[in-house]
Amino acid sequence: MVGNVLIVEDEPDIRRLTSNPKTIPRAIRLILISRFLERVADHATNIAEMVIYMVESKMVRHSLA
């Protein structure tokens, strides 16, 4: 289960969100939320890597796949 951690990063379409001045505050909030969620995902990945190391004694932190 822990070995199936998938990291997916997509960038939002900023031009579409900022084309109308009324939607700029919403766009800023969405950008901040996405940044915070990415940070949470990074922490979850780090925890998963530590669990794999503790359980299997296998270092996956610096591997590419």
Image: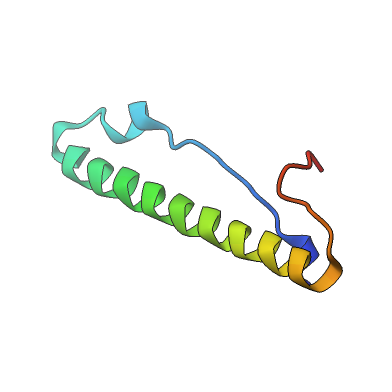
Q: Is residue 65 left or right of residue 36?
A: right
Image position, residue 22 (x, y; %): 14, 39
Which quadrant of the rendered structure holds the N terminus?
bottom right
Q: Total of numbered circles in the picture?
A: 0
Which residue is pictured at 37% across the width and 53% down the height? 36
Question: Viewer-proximal residue, 59 or 22?
Answer: 59
Which quadrant of the rendered structure holds the C terminus?
top right
Q: Outermost residue toward the left?
A: 22
Which residue is pictured at 79% across the width and 53% down the height? 59
Q: Quadrant of residue 57?
A: bottom right
Which residue is pictured at 45% across the width and 52% down the height? 39
Image position, residue 14 (x, y; %): 36, 31
In the rendered view, tell whether residue 36 sits above or below residue 12.
below
Q: Is residue 3 left or right of residue 36?
A: right
In the rendered view, tell whether residue 41 sits above or below residue 13.
below
Which residue is pictured at 57% across the width and 63% down the height? 44
Question: Viewer-proximal residue, 18 or 60?
Answer: 60
Image position, residue 3 (x, y; %): 79, 63
